[in-house]
Amino acid sequence: MPGRQAAFRADYRERIAPAYAGWAHVALIAVLGAAAIWVCARQITAPAWYEWLVIPFAFCASNVFEWWIHKTVMHRPVKGLMGIYRRHTLAHHEFFTDVEPTLDNSRDFRIVFFPPYALVAFMTMSLVPAFVLGQAGLANAGWLLLITNTGLYLNYELFHFCCHVKNDSVVRRIPLVNSIRRHHIAHHNPAIMMERNFNLTYPVADWFFGTSDLKCGLVKHIFNGYDTAAVRRDLKRAGTP
Ligand SMILES: [Zn+2]
Ligand SMILES: [Zn+2]
């Protein structure tokens, strides 16, 4: 591990509160998310066929949002949102590099999972379009939108964890998860982190906007796994398999 990364890790770990419990952090996110999905699901009554169309729409919108917020707010200092930039670019990317992208124990969850209030913030943002749908007489679509967005948030946290977990003997065999693990670990190369691989669930927006380190089609992007054959030649790190 590079000396700078090792020094950052030692300093960061020293500053994690002694009372911090990684699994409690994860449980809180999971319980909050599952409760929100359960509450929303109970409100749905006989949706019309066209109300289900909100799910693919929300999937695409969330995928672009995830790409956009990572590319802009998380990697560029934006006035009023500096905390997010500091936490991501100046902490998460110092703690994990493409040379050593894995966590050592559950206390390191502190630097992988977002604080639980981030989930509440994203759910609150989703309330706006859901309310508009409700006002337009599409209340079921509004609830389905909230469920989809909350589900994708949990999906994001789970996949990001799978990117940084130490033992990859399981995740390297799971389709989609292995693709995002390679995709995200490449993003942790400081030389390309500002320009490439911003998706954390499915690399759809990276493919669409041309910010992926791969030069191939959408299906190959999603099911690429650990394959580095399609990595753009100028982005291949010397020595990477
Ligand atoms: Zn990461
Ligand atoms: Zn990043």
Image (spheres, rainbow, N blue to C red):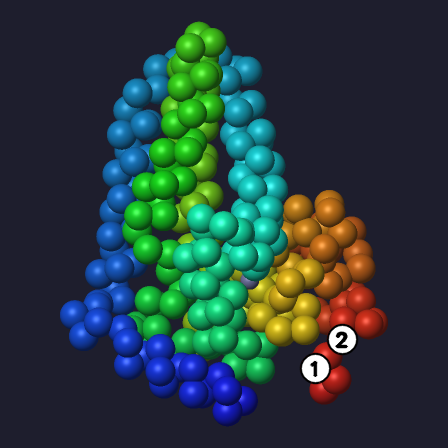
Residue plotted at (25% across, 55% down): 27
Residue 64 placement (x, y as % from top left): 60, 42
Q: Quadrant of residue 232?
A: bottom right
Left or right placement of residue 22 versus residue 55 in this view: left
Residue in the foreground of this view, choosing between 94 and 35? 94
Mark 1 and ligand 1: say if the CB distance to the nearest ligand atom is below 8 Å: no
Residue in the foreground of this view, choosing between 84 and 153? 84
Q: Is residue 12 above or below residue 81?
A: below
Residue in the foreground of this view, choosing between 11 and 18? 11
Left or right placement of residue 46 versus residue 38 in this view: right
Residue in the foreground of this view, choosing between 130 and 214? 130
Disc 2 marks which residue? 236
Query: Tag 2: residue type?
Result: Lys
Residue plotted at (63% across, 70% down): 186
Position of the C terminus by quadrant: bottom right
Left or right placement of residue 17 versus residue 118 in this view: left
Within 10 Å of the Cα at label 2, are there few (<14), some (14-19), or many (20+) other Cα atoms? some
Residue plotted at (27% across, 44% down): 32
Disc 1 marks which residue? 240
Residue plotted at (46% across, 16% down): 133
Residue 120 placement (x, y as % from top left): 32, 41
Q: Is residue 52 above or below residue 108?
A: above
